[in-house]
Image (tube, helix red, strand yellow):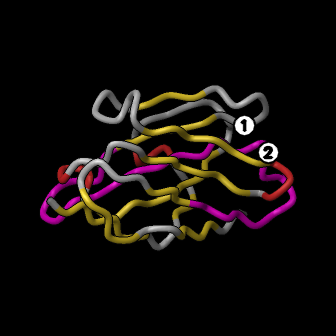
Amino acid sequence: QVQVVESGGGLVQVGGSLRLSCAASGRTFSVYAMGWFRQALGKAREFVAAISGGAGSTYYADSVKGRFTISRDHAKNTVYLQMNSLKTEDTAVYYCAARRPSSLRVAPHEYDYWGQGTQVTVSS
């Protein structure tokens, strides 16, 4: 079992940057694929980015491609989401999630373990 805890959210102006972190427990962190999702007020949870276990292949939603970067540090059991050129439509609660096997998936129901979320607000 894996527990994940997000941090790094906050208030930022349009065009700014934030880096979210997701700390995972457990000694088998490297075999899990990790994903970032977000949920804006009144909307469904949507996929943002994912990274596979091992070598760390990545996949992004079209809406964030070229602006966001997902990465992982196996030594620290941590996944990051670097968010640049933020837009007001990026405002949401951002969730980190883990799944096994470590292949990339974009559907929330494919993920087994979820964090509590961290709020990101982009103001104009």
- Residue 83 part of the magenta-drawn span: no
User: Dot 2, how many residues are within 10 Å of its Cα: few (below 14), some (14-19), or many (20+)?
Assistant: many
Q: CA distance from mark 1 to mark 2?
A: 5 Å
**Residue of label 1:** 53
Magenta part of the chain = 21-46
**Which element type, helix, strand or loop, lies under badge 1?**
loop
Residue drawn where x is 39% and y is 60% of the image: 94
Residue drawn where x is 62% and y is 66% of the image: 4
Name the image quarter holding the N terminus: bottom right
Whole-percent x and y of residue 88?
Answer: 18, 53
Q: Which mark is residue 12?
A: none
User: Dot 1, how many residues are within 10 Å of its Cα: few (below 14), some (14-19), or many (20+)?
Assistant: many
- Image-quadrant location for residue 71: top right
**Which element type, helix, strand or loop, lies under badge 2?**
helix
Which amino acid type is marked by label 1? Gly
The reply, left or right, for residue 47 in relation to residue 104 is: left
Whole-percent x and y of residue 77?
Answer: 77, 57
- Residue 28 part of the magenta-drawn span: yes
The reply, left or right, for residue 24 in relation to residue 80 is: right
**Residue of label 2:** 30
- Image-quadrant location for residue 38: bottom left
The one of 49 and 109 positioned closer to us in this rendering: 49
Would you say the residues marked 1 and 2 are in contact, meaning their CB atoms lie under 8 Å apart? yes
